[in-house]
Structure formats: C-alpha cells, structure tokens
Image: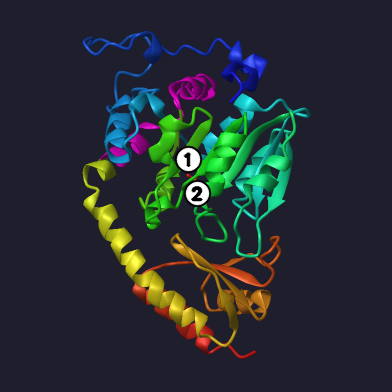
Amino acid sequence: MKQLQDLVRPNIWALAPYSSARNEYAGHTAHVFLDANENPYNKPYNRYPDPLQEELKKKISKVKGVAPEKIFLGNGSDEAIDLCYRVFCEPKKDNVVAIEPTYGMYKVCADINDVEYRPVLLDENYQMSAKELLAACDENTKLIWICSPNNPSGNNMNPDEVTKVLNGFDGIVVVDEAYSDFSKARTFRQNLDDYPNLIVLNTFSKAWGCAAIRLGMAFAQKEIIDIFNKVKYPYNINALTQKKASEILDDIQDVREWLRLLLQERGPMMKAFGELPICKEIYPTDANFFLARMTDAQAIYDYLVKKGIIVRNRTRIQLCKNCLRVTIGTKSENAELIGALRQYKQ
Ligand SMILES: *Cc1c(COP(=O)(O)O)cnc(C)c1O
C-alpha cells in the first residue's frame, strides 16, 4: 500500500475540521450546558447527539469484533460510499475500478464527484478476476470496489481473488459486506488487521431490519476512520437513530430469529421459483435475495406490478438480460409471488 498521505486528497489531508461544542467538551461530569445554543426545554430532543456515537460504537464493537476506533458510522452505507470518493479521489483526475454488475451507488457517487468509474465485467458465473481488476488500474486509481455477497447476483466473490486484489493493489480496496449476515463464508471484516488498505462496509438496512433508521458502518484502520470523521457532517447520526440502533443491539435475539426464518424460506422459495416454466435459470445466492433469468423479465415484471407485487427488474443491467432480482419475504409473501407466477400466461 502507498502511504496514506499519498492516497488522501491534499485538501482533505490538510483539513482543519469543524469543531462542535460537543467535540470541545468531551467530559461527562458537567451538568449545566450553556455552550451549544440549545434550548433547555423539550428533553431529550433539545440536545445535539454525540458526534462520534461512542456508546453505540462500543455495542457494535462487541457484536462485530472490531475495536470502536476502527468503526465509522454513516447515514446509511451510502454516506460511507460517498465519503470514500470525497476523501480519496481528486475530481477529473483520479479513477476507481469496480466489479460489474454491482450495487449502483458506487457509480452514482463517482458521477456526483466527477470521478472516472471503470467497470470490469464478472464472468458468466458472476465471479471476479483479480488479474482483470488489477489490469484496469493505473497510477491514478485510488479505490477498487468489491461487493460480496454481490448485489444483484447474490453470490460471494471468491475470497482468494479478493485477497489477491488486497495484496496486489497499492490503493484502497472497499469490500461491501452488506449481506454477509446471510452467508456462512468468512468475512473480510474479521481480517481487517491484516490489510491496512481495506475498508469493509456493513449496514443496519438488511439482516438487522432497520433500513428506515439509515445507519451504515465502515470498518478500517484507525487512521482512515479518523479522516472519515473529520470530513463527515458533525452530527451525521441523529439521536433517534442512535437510540433505536442501541436497542436492537441490546436484543440481537430478534435479528437471529429473522435470519433463521429468512434462511429457512430461501431454499424452498428458490426451488419453487426455479421450477416455474417461465424461469430459465436461477443463480446461487449467499444473500436474502436471488437473481433469476426469465423468458421475458419486462412482461413478467409488468404482470406482477398489476397484481401489487414488486420485484426488481434488472434486465437492462450488464450480464443480467431478462433477469429479475427477488428478495426473500415472509412465507405468505413468497407464496403469493409463486402463486401469481404459476398463473402467468406467456
Ligand atoms: C442495500 C445495500 C447497502 C445498504 O445501503 P444503506 O445505505 O446502508 O441502506 C449497501 N451495499 C449494498 C451492496 C446494498 O445492496
């Protein structure tokens, strides 16, 4: 890996961050707070939330096995994705490399930040090649995006190939493990300390059942997390989100039970789906969704919309012609989808 200073944009490296009232007084013994121009009434909403979410990070640390100082919390993973560009990529000069097809936000954030995005096609089994990803890099490549399990294909990337990228690239490798709770594979989050250039993304939006509260996590070496904290909005995680996340972490039995139910549904649901005459191929998944190649994805999608059932039409995505992406729902939701598709007339 290059020196961190050579990867971070010079203006960000030199940035003197905004210092909030809650930053400047970080002790816990005071009882009169006249420093932040808050209203003394309307407790508890009158006070600014903890800008670094320290209590919440302690709880996350226990569940995820990552030290609190190696955790960044964002307004969804999307904030962490955007910060990767704002921290590392000089607009109009630097570029990033990513597997293709994958999660759309990597490209949208590249476009917003005016950073060149270099997609590298997966093979016909939706597997990545480290050699091809590395071959797409040049001296201005700052980030490589790997999503595993990958959205929309659902499968884990081959860990040996991911390791080759981590070892062979002198910039930052982001491994988005948004769906790793649904997979039995070893996560790269567990190997954080082996790779100074690794950023792992997790989210409360999928297995944790909290998409509405907007809470995403990035795990990386402390030096990278410190830079993220310097660039983010001072109070990026609001108090309601911190409270709800904290409650969920106090009772992770709920999350375990949801996971058990979804994984129990996944096999039979995919089997029934794969047996439909309009399904030509169903792809193996390590996530809470699967990709299926249909006879005519657009027509089937439109038919389902009329029945009030929404799946994701991926037919216009590279390597996904005529593919639908289907999330695993409750037993009755899944049964309703299969029932509707059995009645579909070609
Ligand atoms: C759903 C998803 C996320 C989650 O994004 P949030 O902003 O945390 O809701 C992240 N990465 C991938 C690949 C996803 O599919």
Label 2 sits on what residue type? Pro
The reply to whether the C-beta atoms of the residues labelled 1 and 2 are less than 8 Å apart is: no
Q: Quadrant of residue 127?
A: bottom right
Residue drawn 59% across and 51% down?
103
Q: Nearer the viewer, mark 1 or mark 2?
A: 2
> How many residues crowd around disc 1 within 10 Å: few (fewer than 14), some, or many (20 or more)?
many
Q: In the rendered structure, find residue 167 and report the number of the disc placed on it.
A: none
Residue 252 percent across, percent down from the top left: 25, 48
| Residue 244 vertical position relative to residue 331 in the rendered view, above or below | above
> How many residues crowd around disc 2 within 10 Å: few (fewer than 14), some, or many (20 or more)?
some
- Residue at which label 2 appears: 159
Question: Is residue 177 in sight in this rendering?
Answer: yes
Label 1 sits on what residue type? Leu
Indicate whether residue 222 is drawn in magenta. Answer: yes
Among all residues in the image, which is located at the extreme right?
92
- Residue at which label 1 appears: 201
Report the magenta residues as a range: 221-246
Q: Judge: label 1 CB < 8 Å from ligand 1.
A: yes
Residue 149 percent across, percent down from the top left: 49, 54
Residue drawn 69% across and 69% down?
321
- Magenta: main secondary structure equals helix
Residue drawn 44% across and 13% down?
20
Quarter containing the C terminus: bottom right
Colouring scheme, one of rainbow, by chain, secondary structure, one colour: rainbow
**Is 209 on the left or on the right of 10, as rendered?**
left
